Image: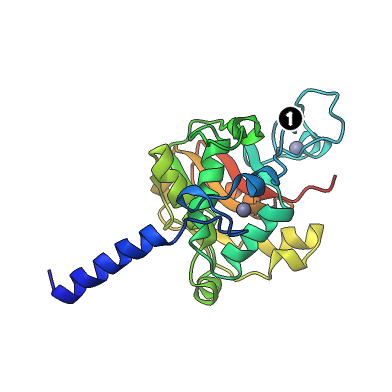
Amino acid sequence: MQPHFLGQLMLNTFLNLLLPQICPLCSTDSEDDQFCQKCLSDIRLITSPICLCCGVPFISQECEDHLCGRCIKKQIPFSTARSIGVYEGVLLEAIHKFKYNGKISLSKALVKIMASATGMQSHRNIAFEKASGAILSGSPDLIVPVPLHKTRLKERGFNQSLLLARGLAGIYHLSIDYLNLKRIRSTDHQVNLKGKDRLVNVRGAFAVKDRDAFKDKKVLLIDDVYTTGATIAECSKVLKKAGAKDVNILTLARVVNL
Ligand SMILES: [Zn+2]
Ligand SMILES: [Zn+2]
């Protein structure tokens, strides 16, 4: 080992001992750079009653999970979509810092939240198993992140969904495929578009490279935010067309108009 390298290593170890581990959002002390208890408790978890298919939460608390009007009327290309929390407050702030401000170190804390909510990892601070995400149906064979177009990837430098999917694949002990579902057309930012325009915007935007990759596979598709479901529905259609047996969706957050 080079002497200067050894010196650097010792310095880093020394600094790690000196510097407190902090919450990546509010900078209060927190173990292992996870969100502190206050930030975690500020996340509004999505809980039953929800739509059995698309996972939308219902306003009335006086009912069981059932299909929403949209899922009854339309043919939905995925089996279930589940999200951990409402896209607001600390969760929105965390996703913005992660995605738009390039704070990729946040992915570790965000993956932990997803894993806790899906019952794959206990979290000492929060009863996340109550989140709807706990029902990870479909016992997937393969994790697939929603891909970015190469132009967007170049702009951002990373695919936020891939970082989440990779973390989850490690925890779930599942294979990940991030090469065979491709975004072949650059699309406008969905956030700037409304309802039908979002559907048109993503139509034909995805394609499968190696069709055998998804044949007879139960796929768990990962995205950061579920807004109208247009993107994940389009990805699901393409995966199904390529022979996927089943597609289930898990997103970290969901836009909820309640
Ligand atoms: Zn905090
Ligand atoms: Zn629904």
Report whether the residue tagged 1 is closer than 8 Å to ligand 2.
no
Residue at far left of view:
1
Q: Is residue 203 visible?
A: no
Q: Residue 135, relative to residue 33: is it above or below?
A: above
Q: Nearer the viewer, residue 214 or 117?
A: 117
Tell me the quarter of the picture where residue 59 sits.
Answer: top right
The three-letter code of the residue at mark 1 reads Ser
Tell me the quarter of the picture where residue 210 sits.
Answer: bottom left
Q: Residues within 10 Å of mark 1 (few under 14, many from 20)?
A: some
Instruction: Locate the C terminus and report the quarter of the image it occupies.
Output: top right
Q: Residue 64, relative to residue 127: is it above or below?
A: above
Please say which color scheme the image uses: rainbow
Pinpoint residue 111: horizontal percent, then vertical percent: 51, 48
* SS under mark 1: loop
Pinpoint residue 43: horizontal percent, then vertical percent: 69, 46
Assign ligand 2 to one image quadrant. top right
Q: Residue 94, relative to residue 140: is it above or below?
A: below
Q: Indicate left or right for 130 with 151 as reference.
A: right
Pinpoint residue 180: horizontal percent, then vertical percent: 43, 56
Instruction: Locate the N terminus and report the quarter of the image it occupies.
Output: bottom left
Q: Nearer the viewer, residue 144 or 173?
A: 173
Instruction: From the image, tell me which residue sits under label 1.
Output: 48
Q: Indicate left or right for 143 with 191 as reference.
A: left
